[in-house]
Image: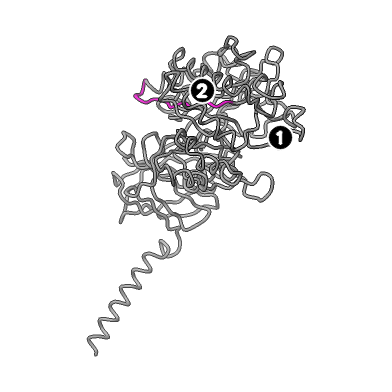
Amino acid sequence: MKRLRGVVWMVVASLAVSVSALGQAQDFTAVRAGVDFSKQVRDWDGFGVNYVEAAQAIDYTQDPQEYGGLSLLTEEKRQQIVEMVFGEDGLKPGLVKMFLDPHHQREPGGPFDHETTTRWMRYFVREGLKRSRARGDDLTIITTLYGPPAWATKQKFMRGRDLDPARKYDLARYMIDWVRYLREEEGFPVRYISLHNEGEDWLRWPADGASGNIGAGHDYNLFWPPEQVADFIKILRPMLDAAGLQDVGVTPGECTNWYRFSAWGYADAIADDPGALASLGLITSHGFYGGSYGRWFGEHRSLGTDILREKRPELHAWVTSTSWSMMDVANIKEMHGNIYTAKVNGIIPWACIQRPARWVGGDPNPGTAFRVSEDGSYEVLRGYYYYKQLTRAGQPGMAVVKTFAMDSEVAVIGFARNGTKHPDAFVVVNLGKDKKVAVKVVGAGSDSFGVFRTTDEKDRCEQIARATLENDTIVWDVPAQSATTFFAQ
């Protein structure tokens, strides 16, 4: 009996030690967190950038809008920005979004002008592609129909609400000719074509559709009900094939957020249509976040992608626009939500360079990486440095890995090298006050990590130290409102 009691006591003691070790780190003084590079969640296609040129102009001959702002800068300044985005020490994006505005063809069957309204967007991508390929990388481009020409709508004016059924094949040709131009004339690697820009938002028009979008601040749109999306996917796929563009995938367009993509019926409309489901090449949506119930509610949810992946598990999903918010660490938490809750394979935020004076009615999404002023100067905003934490860590071809953190003010985002030349990396996000975080690291390719940090006021994504695993754990002091990236070395 005494021997048995001794054994029981040893087991209890062992469990107590084990529970203590697995409870909270550093005697309850640190947040317990972890990243497991051996447990890959999904392939990662990369982070991206978007240059927006013509976004609202109704009559481009009278209002040649250039929202991106490169036209105001000297060539030297343009090259500085291109280098900071695409250069070896820049963001190094793998994805690019290019809009197709409504001004490329005056009438169906008429000549195309793909150059007048896209000069600076094409410059940005052309120069970026040169730099990307010079370092041995490449870009994957998605192009989105920002809004159709007036002739494609029932209303026959710019920003008309409804697609004219008699013109749907002409509109498909409009989109295909733009893709052909970009690939054949510019040599751009366009891989996807997206049907619409926030076309689910029927409340942007008056009930009778007798005038354009309500409010001067809205950009180009067309109302795309779910059935129209499913139908157009089936139209566009064989037309692309006939044009020799078999490797260009079709996406369902871009709802305002992932909640609308599922709750408003878009995912189900495609999943229930065998032709549309078979023709779909990529799942897309904007990833704008709104946590309060109401008109602009938009949680990070994966239901829409889950519905489609149940029938086609191989499908990837991208966020094709999302806010820079306040250009702070909370924005990186939004990215965490899109990656781990919406389950995406790539993220492209809203315009990375903006000229606020050219957005009619005041820009509702003023956050960005670069801001251009009317005097021909530009500034690099803190959004650039926070975003750089992610873009450098999550390069194309890597894999999202499992992470956790036992504090809702802390988030961990992890990317495994997955056979690429890029090192394992993880980002620790702290939304609260100064904290100590103990990150258990499993399956990394190294015990040593370079540490880069961005904070609101001081650090600008610069290496601040090196960290070494001790007992498979990194214990680190993370400042309030900060993002810290650890790169395996």
140 within the magenta span: yes
On-image quarter of the N terminus: bottom left
26 within the magenta span: no
Disc 1, SS: helix
Disc 2, SS: helix
Q: Position of residue 290 (x, y in %)?
A: 62, 46
In this view, the residue farthest toward the left is 3
What amino acid is at disc 1?
Arg
Q: Where 480 sits versus 454, above or below?
A: below
Q: Position of residue 133 (x, y in %)?
A: 37, 21
Q: Position of residue 161 (x, y in %)?
A: 69, 29
What amino acid is at disc 2?
Ile
Q: Where 367 sits versus 10, above or below?
A: above
Residue on which disc 2 sits: 81
Taking depth in this image into account, of 36 and 217 the one nearest to the observer is: 217
Q: Is residue 438 visible?
A: yes
Taking depth in this image into account, of 271 and 39 the one nearest to the observer is: 271
Number of numbered markers: 2
Residue on which disc 1 sits: 204
Name the residue at 76% across, 33% down.
206
Name the residue at 49% across, 52% down.
410
Viewed as shown, does residue 372 lie left or right of 465? right
Q: Where 122 sits versus 311, above or below?
A: above
On-image quarter of the C terminus: top left
Badge 1: residue crowd in 10 Å (few <14, some 14–19, many ≥20): some
Tell me how far mark 2 sits from mark 1, CA to CA: 34 Å
Q: Which residues are magenta?
A: 134-145
Query: Dividing the picture into quarters, in which one does residue 463 lie?
Result: top left
Mark number, residue 118: none
